[in-house]
Image: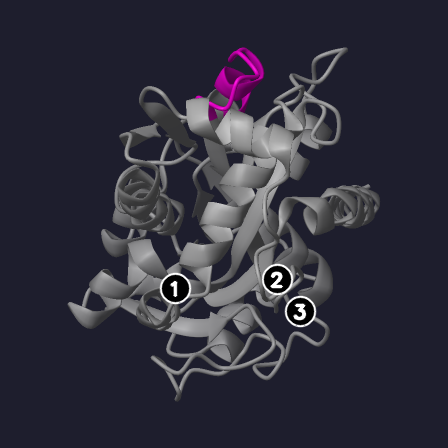
């Protein structure tokens, strides 16, 4: 989905002046997750190419922990000068909603300046390869028969994996028990080892384990089956009507970053996202290109925040 002009507009006088000075040193891109995750792979893809195009290093800096909270909080403390960016996902919107503090750690609409959206990432529910659950129907049968017996792991409260389980419980009218971890690799490892029943993760972390015969995929979370797993049904097809979930990947900067810098970064990211190389990368990662320039992304941020707030409220009501 393209939400910016196909032709990049010529920069105005002010933007050209800023472009001559920016970037004059290395730019950090915070990755609010561990190495080897989907968001990490996408960040490094763009960091390498932005560095070549703008002739300064763009450095991917992993800041896993608390479902992304550590990385997002770090960005809010950075100077709004374009030298610290982040690639975000669903937890950007969810973490403040799950916060028990009187004041959430940040406001996703006020504390961040949208730069560009590049993709949407679906997830999949996976179990150990030797799990007794051969299908989603098998898993649901046990969940309904023995509420609270089945466990699922995530990379922290408010993470996309956590919410996947919350929505799955709600729409299937079941009750799997949430076990949070610090990183997605830890959440996956305990599923592989049989200590946790299932998890819901993006393709980057779990596909190598599936291909290596250590995990089995029961269902994918988006509306269509994956080209890489054509025999695996969507969760909706497998019996949980109305289930659809994916994580948008948005580059953002601290609020107050000068608009010419945002425009320059948006234009450069947009160029990279339109290349056949990125389309092929997305296909290998089982993610969908979805491209917004920074002006089109501003209203999208408000819409996403409202949508996830509604989902979280719905899940809380269902939990009593």
Q: Nearer the viewer, residue 115 or 248?
A: 115
Per the model, the C-alpha gap separating discs 3 and 1 is 16 Å
Q: Which residue is mark 2?
A: 245
Task: Sort mark 1 into few (<14), some (14-19) or many (20+) by Cα contacts within 10 Å.
Answer: many
SS class of the residue under badge 2? loop
| First to last magenta residue range | 72-84
Q: Is residue 163 magenta?
A: no
Location of residue 191 with respect to 5 vertically, above or below: above
Q: Nearer the viewer, mark 1 or mark 2?
A: 2
Q: Is residue 220 left or right of residue 56?
A: right
Q: How is the image coloured?
A: one colour
Quadrant housing the N terminus: bottom right
Task: Sort mark 2 into few (<14), some (14-19) or many (20+) by Cα contacts within 10 Å.
Answer: many
Q: Residue 309, located in which quarter of the rendered image?
A: top right
For marks 1 and 2, the one nearer the N-term is: 1
For marks 3 and 1, the one nearer the N-term is: 1
Q: Are marks 3 and 2 in contact (CB under 8 Å)?
A: yes
Q: Which residue is mark 3?
A: 243
Q: Identify the disc placed on residue 126.
A: 1
Q: Residue 120, located in which quarter of the rendered image?
A: bottom right
Q: Is residue 235 left or right of residue 127?
A: right
Instruction: Please provide percent x and percent y for residue 314.
Output: 82, 49
Per the model, the C-alpha gap separating discs 1 and 2 is 15 Å
Instruction: Please provide percent x and percent y for residue 2.
Output: 62, 66
Instruction: Please provide percent x and percent y for residue 61.
Output: 32, 28
Q: Nearer the viewer, residue 17 or 304?
A: 17
Farthest residue in the bottom direction?
Answer: 231
Q: Nearer the viewer, mark 3 or mark 2?
A: 2
Q: Is residue 73 magenta?
A: yes
Per the model, the C-alpha gap separating discs 3 and 2 is 7 Å
Q: Residue 228, located in which quarter of the rendered image?
A: bottom left
Quadrant housing the C terminus: top right
């Amino acid at each position: 989905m393209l939400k910016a002009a196909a032709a990049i507009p010529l920069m105005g006088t002010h933007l050209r002046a800023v472009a001559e000075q920016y970037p004059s040193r290395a730019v950090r891109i915070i990755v609010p997750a561990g190495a080897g995750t989907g968001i990490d792979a996408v960040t490094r893809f763009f960091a390498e190419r932005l560095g070549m195009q703008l002739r300064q290093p763009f450095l991917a800096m992993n800041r896993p922990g608390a479902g992304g909270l550590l990385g997002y909080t770090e960005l809010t403390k950075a100077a709004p000068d374009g030298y610290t960016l982040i690639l975000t996902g669903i937890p950007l919107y969810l973490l403040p909603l799950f916060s028990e503090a009187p004041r959430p750690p940040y406001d996703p609409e006020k504390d961040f300046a949208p730069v560009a959206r590049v993709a949407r990432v679906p997830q999949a529910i996976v179990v150990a390869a030797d799990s007794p659950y051969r299908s989603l129907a098998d898993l649901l049968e046990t969940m309904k028969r023995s509420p609270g017996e089945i466990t699922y792991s995530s990379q922290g409260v408010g993470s996309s994996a956590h919410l996947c389980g919350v929505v799955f419980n709600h729409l299937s009218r079941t009750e799997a028990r949430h076990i949070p971890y610090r990183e997605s690799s830890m959440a996956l490892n305990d599923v592989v080892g049989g200590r946790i029943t299932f998890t819901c993760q993006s393709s980057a972390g779990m596909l190598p384990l599936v291909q290596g015969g250590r995990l089995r995929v029961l269902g994918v979370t988006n509306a269509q089956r994956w080209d890489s797993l054509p025999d695996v049904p969507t969760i909706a097809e497998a019996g949980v009507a109305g289930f659809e979930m994916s994580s948008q990947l948005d580059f953002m900067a601290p609020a107050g970053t000068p608009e010419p810098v945002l425009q320059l970064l948006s234009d450069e990211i947009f160029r990279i996202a339109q290349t056949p190389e990125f389309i092929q990368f997305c296909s290998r990662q089982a993610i969908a290109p979805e491209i917004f320039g920074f002006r089109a992304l501003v209203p999208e941020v408000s819409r996403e925040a409202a949508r996830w707030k509604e989902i979280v409220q719905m899940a809380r009501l269902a939990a009593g």
